[in-house]
Amino acid sequence: MKKELKFVVNGQTYDLWIEPKTVLVQVLRDELGLKGTKRSCDSGSCCACTVLLNGKAVKSCSILALQANGKEILTVEGLANGTQLHPIQEAFLDNWAFQCGFCTSGQMMAAKGLLDENPDPAREEIQLAMDGHLCRCTGYNMINEAIQDAAKRLQTQEEQGGAK
Amino acid sequence: MKNIMNNFEYFAPGSLEEALKLLSQYGEDECKIIAGGQSLIILLKQGLITPQYVIDIKGLSELDSISGNEKEGLKIGALTTHRAIEKSPLMQNAFCILAEMEQNVSSVETRNWGTIGGNIAHGDPSGDPAPVMLVLNAKYKLAGAKGERLVEAEDFTSGYFETDIGHDELLTEIQIPAPPPRTGAKFTKFSQLQGDYAIASAAVSMTLDADKKTCADIRIAMGSVAPAPMRAKKAEYLLRGKVITDDLLVEAGRMASEEASPTSDAEISEQYKRELVGTLVTRVGKEAFERAAMA
Amino acid sequence: MSQYDVIGTRAPRVDAPAKATGRAIFVDDMSMPGMLYGALLQSPYAHALIRGIDVSAALKLPGVKAVVTHKEAGLVKYGVSPARYDETIFCYDKVRQVGDNIAAVAAVDMATAVEAASLIKVDYEELPAVFTIEEALADGAPLVHDDYKRNISAEVHQEFGDVEAALKECDLIKTTSLKSKRQDCAFIEPQGCIATYDLSGNLTLYSSTQTTHYVQRSLAMALGAPVGKVRVVKPYVGGGFGSKASASHLEMAACLLAMQTGKPVKMIFDREQVFLHGRARHQFVHTMTTGVKKDGTIMALKHEAWLNGGAYSSFGIATVYYAGSLLGGPYKLPNMKYDGYRIATNLPACGAQRGHGGVIARSCWEQQLDMIAEELGMDPLELRLKNIMTAGDVTCNDLDMSSLGMKECIEVVRDASDWKNKKGKLPQGKGIGMACGFFVSGAGFPIYRSETFHCTVTIKVTEDGGTAIVSTASAEIGQGSDTTFAMIAAEGMGIPLGMVRIESGDTDFGVDLGAYSSRQTLMTGQATKQAAENVKMQVLDALSKELHVPVEDMDIKKGYIVFKKDKPDLSALKTRYIKEHREWTDNPSLDDELSFREASRIAFFTKGTIVGTGMYKPPELGGKFKGAAVGTSPAYGCSAQIAEVSVDEQTGRITIEKMTDAHDCGQAINRTSVEAQMHGSMAMGLGEALFEEVKFDDKGRLLNGDLAEYKMPTALDMPPMEALIVESHEPNGPYGAKEVGEGNIMPTIAAVLNAVHDAIGVRIHELPLNPERVYLAIKEYREKNAKQ
């Protein structure tokens, strides 16, 4: 029997009826068409599907969509402000923090979760926070550098009083 | 993995009372409780479990809190996330073992959503929190239609994924007593990859005499090396009342290693796990000793 | 100052905006109106006769639109090497591995398709199976394929020089071995595809592939369609590393189902199917005997290799050849004998993976060279320098090192890592080790024998002259090839990178053999450069006629025409151009410069659309001996690496503290991209060195076919990596460029093995170096030493 799911995704309120067995990534991709969130292992072991739920990084393959009822979700599609990239996106772009790009959305969302909590993380703190994210292309060094760079950009933005 | 999750009826009770009522109604049937679901959803997707009813308690905010202090002990609501424990300012001194343990539970993503109660109630022998609860002498509060009861952490898990929770019961709270003075505790796990699940883990809580050299009391727990997290009681007996030395700790590790009963799996042999856990006990024993001496 | 304007910079990736916003479309992100979903029925047995297949229950399930088996698919044999076409789309007589493909279903949704596949009844008669090399070679062992006697699917016997004679002259002869485990490419995007079939008989496949061209040809052959009616399009691809370099059953089945139903059919592997499809790194067992003189001069190498190849040949012939041929360099080696055997077993088929065929052979030899250096009392780095080849050297098996900065690479990592103060001088438990390696920049021949160009590229200039569109069938799979070709095109035309747009990965754009053997930068790069220069010549030719300036007196740089002698009067041209542009907002400034855009617009008036073409195929390469084709390449990239490790002797855990890597990629087209490839190679090499192993139970079923149990490096496992680019000039490469993607993985494992020995004095001859293996090796070493 379908149940009602009312939640906010990237600032937009949605009211859906879904099967209880539906996991969050299915709703995001298949119902809402937000294809930026990727499915890879589909079993909670790669973090490619990471989104922010009430500001915290979570694996959208490992949460029943109904558990997001009443919650706010941010996906990669909600990261940029129109055509203005988020500093994390800029930093990923400039630091070549991706090659194939398949794990990138998840990596960036986790980076946002991290930087919102810890605006100036050390290399080891980034490693610890990003540990769940598998990437087969980069060897992670450039992702780490991108997150450090993003922290600096966000700090500069803050100092200049820009919008967060 | 083919996602072949069966459909089920879903309930999201608004209170503990309501949850317990649902449990008394459906608990006997094919019913599963979901909290963070970080283990459960994988089992559902693999079709390894096919419940007819799923009761979602994740939203019960009354079970999501940490209170207490070093003098009175801690009370941790079962739905407190791993991340909340990791970041809680209450995890000071003797309790910092909890935050240290939590810091390496799976990934941040899992810790942000997964709950301490869900982890413990799952009864996974490779779970990180259980050995720590054992050495901290924790008690688990179980609530059911007939009322509440407290179970010693040590008596809670009886085998692979087997716990003392009744069909109509919920784990609601973890109670950790105040540690005696001059107590130090330390946990470590060893995994294939950094930050992976434990091949073996060890936790030690040691209380020293006023001389800060003699072990007044000790609890040693090991994870992943038996069907359930276990105490290394012979090793504890060896150390209790003795002046702690490196050699003695090595001997305690050796005894703990003999007490363990690991099994070989696709990854690791029984023998390696056994020897490894002894090394871990020696190492955390030393660190717990040093912490106790500083406490 | 660089002589180039675009090449050698750190320009951002051309696909970066799409990938940084989640807008890059991968095949699982695509859907089409009326699209069906397909599912495969795969064998649960490793070896079994098929007595019968009953699809009736599946066909009756509501929502099922088609079920196909070998009856619909036919029995055309295909594969990778024409000499070993040993696969059919679906099994008909027997299954040879768990996951072998029996049937496929198309249905209205994925759940229905999966359910229908489970309703197909197959009557199996289980056969005894072989899983290890030893089992497969045992007397009376069941045969995986009747054609492969003793289950040997390919063997190689080569000798260059006279090894036995040379060994007699040696002062030290050393024999060692190395055994590896099966690795998986473990890209993050599982393979997937969507097939469409129109009423005119055009089949189009959108697929997560590295090689649109080979997929196109395989589909045409196996499905009996003309090549020209088959189009393969590659959307963004989430990594390949080898496993996506040949046509899969998934692609075949999707096409067949689309042809049967007339509807688009989407099929995606789940993660376990990725592992079951395999086609990644073989398991290798190498035994090598090397003879040297007292002064360290390498005289001869005798080498035997055994590969566990799994159920089908795939790339296996090339693999077993590469395992031998890639030891010809980078050290002067006058005598080399190689005997290689690829063994068929009832495990998922192995194929190609980054560093194809050469990685474990290299690891074995580079560890042995360290042992030899130790016995000779030489610094292992000096031993290597003593024997090093330089540009112009030709190996004993006829590989022409047309450029080779190997010596420079060694010197660079030596200095950057402070080797001299660390080697042999670090405290117990800490160690440093080094190794070298090299790899081809594309294979000298296509996989099938043909006179075909390996790539053709066209560049079309838009009518306004403002954008040059590069069209290539080459495959951007994450490695950055689109960026590379856009940069080469920009340099070749003399225009800024921003004026170039690239479209790639579509067989309609021409021929390109695809992303394998590290071929694209050199080969597609050459074709792109030629096409770009062709565009430039056409523009200058038109201009020459307008301005009466000889073509050779003009050039194009940074988007402007350069007049090498007197600047002609441009006013008439300028006026004409401005009249054309009366309503346009992007009029060039009125200064006395003539832009590429203005010039191209003028050229358009006389020539129509400016289209430049380029093509490339390697010249005749290599020796005349059997198998000479494998290993020959127009150029070779090379690497030296230094690993610094610490070993916890009580647990056996190895921690990689730092990697220092130097690679000679010829001219770096994009420096950051080169470094990115170096990083990625090291990560994959460290994974294979320390953790990775695909495991099976005694029935040939996967034990760790998921990303939780298959251990590969995470952010926490990776050390800081220093990537140092060494630039030689490769005469056969575009602007002097050659490979970087695979040469870099060659030294990694051996550098770790050698560092571990430096740390704890123990030599380990089996991978991966997981804690238990290291722990046991230390224990054994201590017990042995205690006895002595």
Image: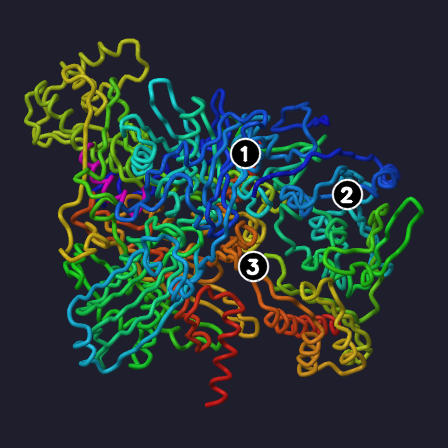
Q: Quadrant of the N terminus of chain B?
A: top right
Quarter of the image where one finds residue C60 = top right
Q: Does the magenta segment cover residue C518?
A: yes
Q: Nearer the viewer, residue C788 or C260?
A: C260
Q: Which residues are magenta?
A: C515-531
Gap in angstroms between the C-alphas marked 1 and 2? 31 Å
Label 1: how many residues lie within 10 Å, few (<14), some (14-19) or many (20+)? many
**Sequence-wise first label, 2 or 3:** 2
Q: Secondary structure at mark 3?
A: loop
On the same chain, marks 2 and 3? The answer is yes
Q: Mark 2 sits on what residue?
A: B33
Which residue is under mark 3?
A: B194
Question: Is label 1 in contact with label 2 (beta carbons under 8 Å)?
Answer: no
Tag in front: 3 or 1: 3
Which percent across, then down, holds residue B267? Answer: 56, 62
Which SS class for mark 2? strand
**Number of marks in picture:** 3
- Residue A147 in view (yes/no): no
Chain letter of the residue carrying label 3: B
Query: What's the residue type where badge 1 is placed?
Result: Val
Tell me if residue C288 comes above or below residue C118 in the rendering: below
Residue lying farthest to the right in this orientation: B146
Q: Nearer the viewer, residue C788 or B218?
A: C788
Q: Which residue is mark 1?
A: A76
Residue visible at 53% across and 73% down?
C775
Whether residue B101 sits left or right of residue C151 in the image: it is: right
Magenta span: predominant SS is helix
